[in-house]
Amino acid sequence: MRLHMWSWLRRWRAPWSMLFIVLLAALALPGCQVGPLTIGAATPPTLPHGWSWYRDSVYPFDTPVPPGWQALGYWYWYTRDKQLCDRVVDLVPPASQPTYIEGNPDGVWNAVRITIPNTCPEWTTADLHGWTHAPTTTVAGTAAQRYTRSDEAGIQQYVVTKIGGRQYVFYFDYSYTSATPQPQASRRLAIFDTILKDFFYHGQ
C-alpha cells in the first residue's frame, strides 16, 4: 500500500516540479521581477485624442505633443564658450516658426520648453524676481515645484523637479498677441498641465 501511494505521489509531483522550475526560470529573465510580477517596461499613458508622443534620443523620457504642434530636440549652449551643455526639447505650436543658430533657437514663442542640464549648472530660483510659488504638482510620479508670473504681457511658468537623479525644468510661455489673446490663456495652460501630467519617464 505504501509503495503504491509513493508511486502515485511521484507521478503527481513530477509535473508540478517542472512547472515550478519553469516559473523560476521565467522570473530570472531580464525585465521580470517579483511582487507584483512585471514583464518588460511600462507603457506610456493613453493621450487625449489627436495627441502624439515624442521620444527623446538622449534621455529616457517621452513627452506628449499637442495636436498640430512639433517637438524639437537639440543641444543648447549656456556658457559663454558656447559649449553645448543643456538638452532641450521645444514643443512648438503651429504659429511659431523657430530657426536655429549654434544650438540657440530664435523665434520660439508661446511654446513649452523642457530643459535637462547635462554639464550646464542646474537651474535655480536666484533670478526669479517677481515670481510666486504656485501649488506643488506631480511630474512622472515625482513632486515638482511650480513658479508663476503674470502681467499685462502674458503668463510664464516654471515647473522644476528631479527625475532619475537629474533635474528637469518645464517652462511655459504665453505672450498676449492678436494671435494669442488673453482669453485663450486658460486653454493653453490646460495644454501645459496635460504635458506635465502625462510626461513619461522610462528610465531606472
Image: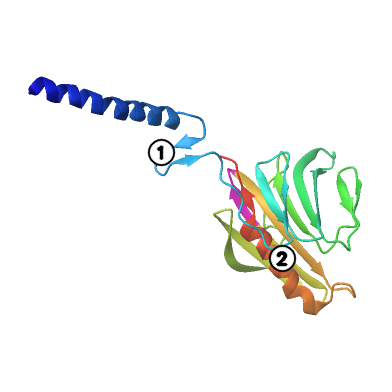
Place of residue 129 in the rendered image (x, y in percent of width and height, measured from the top left):
72, 65
The residue to which callout 2 is attached is: 191
Look at the image and tell me whether residue 151 can be seen: no
Q: Give, as a three-letter code, the residue at label 2.
A: Ile
Q: What's the residue at 65%, 42% (across, down)?
A: 60
- Residue found at the far left of this picture: 1
46 displayed left or right of 27: right
- Residue found at the far top of this picture: 3
Up-down relation of residue 192 to residue 9 (above or below): below
Place of residue 22 in the rendered image (x, y in percent of width and height, measured from the top left):
40, 28
Magenta stretch encompasses residue 101: no
Q: How many marks?
A: 2
Q: Which residues are magenta?
A: 160-165
Give SS at disc 2.
helix
Q: What's the residue at 62%, 69% (across, down)?
A: 134
Closest to the observer: 187 or 2? 2
Closest to the observer: 145 or 45? 45
Q: What's the residue at 18%, 21% (across, down)?
A: 7
Image quadrant occupied by the N terminus? top left
* Mark 1 Cα-neighbour bin, 10 Å: few <14, some 14–19, many ≥20: few
- Residue found at the far bottom of this picture: 183
Closest to the observer: 82 or 21? 21
Give SS at disc 1.
loop
Question: Mark 2 or mark 1, which has the lower sequence index?
Answer: 1
Name which quarter of the figure residue 111 lies in.
Answer: bottom right
Most common secondary structure along the magenta stretch: strand
Q: Which mark is residue 34?
A: 1
Closest to the observer: 59 or 33? 33
* Mark 2 Cα-neighbour bin, 10 Å: few <14, some 14–19, many ≥20: some
Place of residue 148 in the rendered image (x, y in percent of width and height, measured from the top left):
69, 68
